[in-house]
Amino acid sequence: MIFFLNDNKACFGIKYFLRLGQNFHCFGDLFLQNTIVLITNNEKFAQKVQKKIFLLRNTDEFKIIGTPHSIEMVKKIEPVLIFYHLPKEDSNSEEFLNFVQKIKQTNGLKTVSIILVYEEIDEDFLCSAFERGITDFMPADATDSEYTIRTIWCLQKREQSFENESSKDILSQLKIIDKTNHVYTENYTYTILKEESKKNWGSFVVVAPDINIRSKISPQTLMNTIKKTVRACDILGYATDFKIYLWFRQTSKEDVIKILEKIKVTLTSGFSISAGFIETKNLAFDEAEELANKALSKALLKGNTFLYAKEPKKKEVNIEANVKNFKLHKENFVKKLEAILSPLFYQTQKRNEEKLFETKITQSVNEEKSWFKLENENGKSSFEISCPGFTKINIQVIHDIKDSEMKAEKLYIERDELTEEKIDYLLNSFIKDFQNYTNS
């Protein structure tokens, strides 16, 4: 290995590199064959940059090519890092922006790092360059150590990008993420978002194209537009009926509105979307999903509307209090409970019969015990409600799934806390859990 020592800072660059080299296993292909390319028409500048690059070893190559035919040469060489020199007279070069775009669209070069080396730079042009896909930028007269550190950093970032691409390939083969745009598929979106919601609060959003334009725009096209607008840390996934689910971690409803408005502006002229959304600070994900979907349904009726789903006020069941006769009090309590359960169980069964493929649904409501049962070839589950006293009701959830050891779960609801919405929420959660367990 040969180092070119130009100044004291250069010595620092070498020491920094050698210190990193002690942990060479962390860099993966950093210590394999690396070709670094400099694109410039200035021969004097090219020699200067080559002296500043301290990573050159026997296994490395440093190639200099001119801007004419640079795309073809880069495709042939397949470098890991490209320095692109932009002289002062080309500080707003459209040719450079097109070069970056073509590189990022070429298979085999998507993970290559591109460093813009400028004589003079315009901020708007720099923003455009980052949008096209450059990795970093630096002045042409940067110090030797800066060239070294920027090079090491870009090689590390490239390796991380390569590992990310490999992970995405594996997940797409397992059909966990979509192979085209790398968002979660319909079968996994609900599970991923529910688990994410347990980690921290956020805003849950359901987006769908308006009914009158669904024949003109595909879910994939809409997803690509949304993905370009949101942050990399936001979670996206497909759902049923043209819907797209989004999860924004620790994001207020005011900021969600701004994001949705930005998506609307980005859409092709003539296309429109509607959305239902809600913050989950005080809600479980299942309840948030239901409320957001109801809000979306109302928004779609209006069209081109974003509707915030407010948490409904709890409707307390009117149960007679201070009744002297214990038996009469219990009878009244049970009648009120049956009045809630009979229509609720019936409506829930009808709503889920088509969704729960090859699953037998049975339900019964009586004075002693009421139950809602699900059964298919992978297992059976029951949601049982009883009223041993008159101050509370007992709810027992039992999942008997093949090849799985699961314990029964018991819940108690005090008389003053009993609402129709609460039982509806618990019943829907029970159904969702059954689907997850039997599909695993």
Image (tube, grey):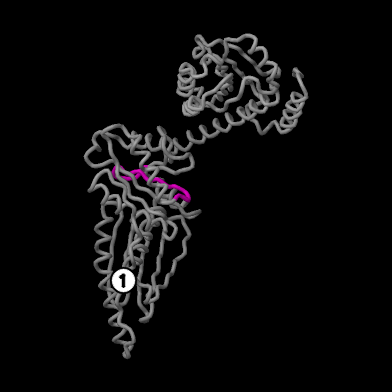
Q: Would you say 234 lies left or right of 416 here?
A: right
The residue closer to the viewer here, 136 or 80, is 136
Number of residues whose C-alpha sits closer than 10 Å to that of mark 1, classed few (under 14), some (14–19) or many (20 or more)? many
The residue closer to the viewer here, 346 or 279, is 279
The residue lying at 38 percent from left, 34 percent from top is 224
Determine the secondary structure under disc 1: strand
Q: Give the residue at mark 1.
A: 370
Magenta residues span 238-251
Number of numbered labels in the structure image? 1
Residue 23 covered by magenta stretch: no
Q: Would you say 124 lies left or right of 245 here?
A: right
The residue closer to the viewer here, 67 or 142, is 142
Query: Height in image: 67 above or below 321?
Result: above
Query: Height in image: 236 above or below 144?
Result: below
At which x and y percent is residue 273?
Answer: 29, 41
At which x and y percent is residue 236?
Answer: 41, 42
Instruction: Give the residue type that dot 1 points to.
Output: Ser
The residue lying at 31 percent from left, 77 percent from top is 368
Q: Quadrant of residue 121?
A: top right
The residue positioned farthest toward the bottom in the image shown: 324
At which x and y percent is residue 319?
Answer: 30, 79
The residue lying at 63 percent from left, 13 percent from top is 46
At which x and y percent is residue 16?
Answer: 73, 30
Q: Quadrant of residue 226?
A: top left
